Amino acid sequence: MSKLLDGKTAIVTGASQGLGLAISTALCTDGASVLMVARDEQKLAEAAAGLQDSGLQATAMVADVTVEGAADDIVNGALGEFGRLDILVNNAGVFVWKGLFDLDYEDWDRTISTNLSAPFHLTRIAGKTMAGQGSGGSIVNIASIHAQVGDPNVIPHCASKFGLVGLTKATADALREHEIRVNAIAPGAIDSNSLDRRGAGPSQKVTQADIASLAVYLVSDLAKAVTGSVIEMYGSTHSVIKI
């Protein structure tokens, strides 16, 4: 029986745990071959081994997405492993919880480099690769409720995720002629113990598995007409302050 993503190949960043692992698992389960990318070698190896032990097509690559040249290395790693690239999920991210006056240069630079600059470079290199293949492709950026709502406790995160939405929409237009789609998912607070639990309702925290299911839909041929969209998955997280 054929699966939704049979024959597709993918890169997922921040894939060693949490949402990145959930997305990698969902893509593999639906038939894709996935290059899992993260900085922590031990966690990444354990995560990839868990999928491999289940008979899924997952490969690990240790990389820091903020390092110059990392995007080229990651895309070339996928091409070397699979021979082509169809899907990119920009999931790697950092979250610094500090007030404005407590933030420093390193907090700002690390957040912007990881959450915004890395997706730009990966989209640029992966998009060029997909365009050269001539068969389209799909890119999904993991944004946040903080891409829509400002929060004084996570200012660099808000700036990076607002920027990621702009990047999503601009690159969607840039890549449209190549049949490459770019979309974003904007979750609210995520249940951290939800790798395998689906079905959260609007009065619950969204689950990692539910977000991963949406990612599968967006990269599949079922969503061939969807590009430049930012899909909100807030669950019980309020998009405005309740008084």
Image: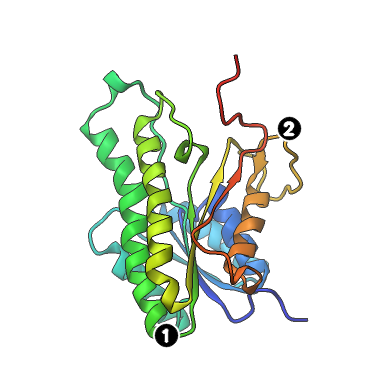
Residue under numbered circle 1: 133
How would you rate the neighbour count of disc 2 (Cα within 10 Å): few for under 14, some for 14-19, many for 20 or more? few
Asked if residue 193 is positioned above or below residue 40 in the image, the reply reads: above
User: Residue 237's spot in the image, x, y percent?
Assistant: 62, 31
- Residue occupying the far top of the picture: 243
Q: Amino acid at mark 1?
A: Gln
Image quadrant assignment for residue 109: top left
Residue 169: x percent and y percent?
43, 57
Which residue does the image show at 54% across and 45% down from the upper left? Answer: 186
- Residue 50 seen in render: no
- In front of the other: 133 or 106: 133
Q: Is residue 16 left or right of residue 153?
A: right
Vertical comparison of 225 with 150: above or below: below
- What quarter of the picture does the N terminus occupy? bottom right
Residue at screen point 62% across, 70% down: 220
Total labels: the figure holds 2
Q: Is residue 135 above or below residue 75?
A: below
For residue 156, side relative to residue 231 (left or right): left
* Residue 129 drawn above or below residue 51: below
Using residue 124 as the reference point, say whether residue 89 is left or right of it: right
Give SS at disc 1. Answer: helix
Q: Where is residue 106 shown, x and y percent of the image?
A: 24, 35
Specify the label residue 203 is tagged with.
2
- Disc on the earlier residue, 2 or 1: 1
Amino acid type shown at disc 2: Ser
Q: CA distance from mark 2 to mark 1?
A: 43 Å
Occupied quadrant, residue 226: bottom right
The answer to whether residue 128 is visible is yes
Neighbour class for label 1 at 10 Å: few (<14), some, many (≥20)?
some
* Local secondary structure at mark 2: loop
